[in-house]
Image: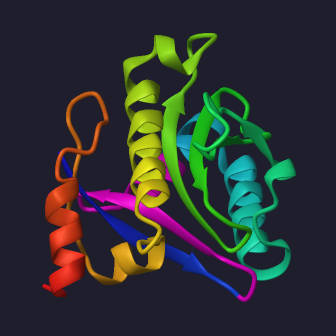
Amino acid sequence: MKFKIFRYSQGSKGVIYTLWKEGDELPELENALLEYKEIRGERYFYELIAFIRGMCEKTGFRVERFRDENLTWKDGIYALRGTAEYRFYLYHNSSERIILTGGGVKTTKLFQEDPKLLFVVNCLKSVSKLLWDHPELNLKLLSDSEIDLDFTWSGELSNIDEILEKITNGS
């Protein structure tokens, strides 16, 4: 499955990126927010939108606002707090930039027990590993370059060499 990293929201304190699946009308975060609105209602939806905008405009992305989902210390995978049974997962790479994406309704105790949630977390872990292993890369560069990220069915990034070649050659 091919995705691009898309700049979703930008403010004076930070930038939220999300994934956008090839062929979809809306980016992953937008789809998740609409699903959240259906489940939780307009009040909670607008509170969440205000919280997200507030992070971009006023507070930045401090990790204490998120629940740690890390399997290792360097993954940088978290879940938004306060979203009840819906899970929004994110990759936190600094106080200025995150990738935020929806996971879905949490019906299991652990995300590893739900294939949809596991896929989302594994995609974010793959991005984390890519950026960790290649410090010349960052979310802004990947977004601005409009490079395809090709994930396997399990959420592993399968085109790392192609990504590096495109960045190196500027194509």
x and y percentages locating residue 119 in the rendered image: 37, 31
* Left or right: 161 in relation to 8: left
Point 23% across, 43% down: residue = 151
The quadrant the C terminus occupies is: bottom left
Figure check: 112 above or below 63: above
> Magenta segment: does it hold 133?
no
Figure check: 148 above or below 38: below
Instruction: Report the front residue among 145 and 168.
Output: 168
x and y percentages locating residue 31 in the rendered image: 42, 51
Numbered range of the magenta stretch: 12-34
Figure check: 171 above or below 124: below
Q: Is residue 168 visible?
A: yes
Point 41% across, 72% down: residue = 137
Instruction: Report the front residue among 111 and 139.
Output: 139
Asked which quadrant contains residue 98, the reply is: bottom right
x and y percentages locating residue 111 in the rendered image: 54, 21
Q: How is the image coloured?
A: rainbow
x and y percentages locating residue 154 in the rendered image: 28, 28
Asked which quadrant contains residue 110, the reply is: top right
Q: Is residue 22 visible?
A: no
Point 47% across, 68% down: residue = 135
